[in-house]
Image (tube, rainbow, N blue to C red):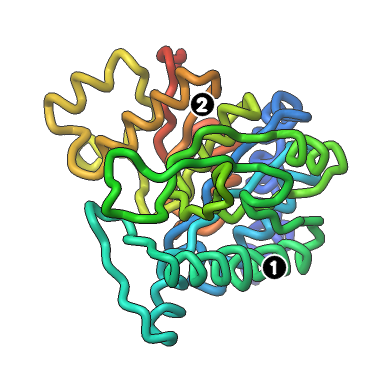
Amino acid sequence: MDDFNHLPKGRGEQKQHSTIGQVLIEALPYIRQFEDKTFVIKYGGAAMKDPLLKSAFAQNITLLRKVGINVVLVHGGGDAITGVAKTMGIETQFVHGKRVTDIEMISVVQMTLAGKVNQDIVRLISEHGGKAVGVSGLDANTIKAVACRDNPQLGLVGEITEINTAYLDLLCQARLIPVIAPIGFDDDSNVYNINADDAASAIAIALKAEKLIYVSDVPGVYHGTTILKSVCKAEAANLIESGVISGGMIPKALSAYKTLDGGVNKIHLIDGRLIHSLLLEIFTNQGVGTQFVTEKEPEL
C-alpha cells in the first residue's frame, strides 16, 4: 500500500491558497489606510512596451481605483515620439538628455503623446474594467509652463509654472482615472514638451498626494547587491557622498526630496519590469523598491 494514501488530497493547493490568503490579509491594513487618498503614478520604461507588463500594469491601476484610491497617471513616451519623428523624416536631437523641440517636433509630441500613446493606455485600462480618461496638460488649463530658462537651446521644452487641479479633482471625484500626457502651454498659446518626471512631481505636489510612484526600469537604490527599502532625507547626502547614490540616481533622489518638501508623503521608485511591482510595493510590508521619506520609519 502507498504510504502516502492517508494524506489529504490537494496539500499543494492548500498551501498555495494559504499563501494567497496571507498576502490578502497583509494588504488589508494598507487598503484601509489609503482609501480616498491620492496616488500620482509616473509610467514609463519597459512597462510601457512589453505586452505582458502593459496588461499587468493596467490591472494594477484598475485594482487601486477599485479599492478606493484616487489614481492619477502621468506617462512618458519618448521612444514612440522618436519613432514617429523618424517616419516623418524629422531628425531627433538631445541636449543633456532632453529632446530638442522645435515647431515640427512639438507637433509630433502632441500627436504621439496626447494621441496614440495616451489613448492606448486608456483603452488598456478600460479592457480590465477601469474607467480612464485621457487628459493632456492643455485640457482645462491643467499644465501652465514657460520655455526652459536654463536651456533655451531646447526650444519648446517647458518648465511648469502652475498646475490647475480643478479638472483632475472632478475626474477623481467621479471615480475616473486621469491619464495625463505631459504637455503644457503659456499665456501666448505656445505649446511645450514637458519632462514626464517633472510633470508627475508638480501634479503630486498640487494635488497634495499621499504618494508619488515612479515606475521605470530602475529597481531602486542599491547598496552593494541589496536594494535599500527606505532612504530618509538625513541619509541622502551621506549616500551621495559615499557613492551609494550616484550617476543618474542623484537627480532622482534630489527631485524626490524636493517633492517631499512640497508636501507629498512618500516617493517610491520601483522596477516596472517586475510584474505586479506596483501592488507588491504598496500592499506588502517589505515592498520591492526604494521609498524616499522625510524621516526614517521603524522597521516592521
Graded by Cα atoms within 10 Å as few (under 14), some (14 to 19) or many (20 or more), the crowding at tag 1 reads some
Q: Relative to 65, is 94 on the left or the right?
A: left
- Residue 87, position as x, y percentages in the image: 42, 87
Q: Quadrant of residue 282?
A: top right
The residue shown at (22%, 34%) is 245
In this view, the residue farthest toward the left is 242
- Quadrant location of the N terminus in the rendered image: bottom right
- Residue 2, position as x, y percentages in the image: 63, 70
The residue shown at (74%, 49%) is 177
Q: In the image, what residue type sits under mark 1?
A: Leu
According to the picture, the residue beneath numbered tag 2 turns out to be 266
The residue shown at (82%, 38%) is 170
- Element assignment for label 2: strand
According to the picture, the residue beneath numbered tag 1 turns out to be 124
Viewer-proximal residue, 229 or 97?
97
Q: Quadrant of residue 288?
A: top left
Viewer-proximal residue, 120 or 31?
120
Establish if 35 lies above or below 42.
above
Question: Can the viewer see residue 291 in this picture?
Answer: yes
- Element assignment for label 1: helix
The residue shown at (69%, 54%) is 135
- Residue 63, position as x, y percentages in the image: 73, 49
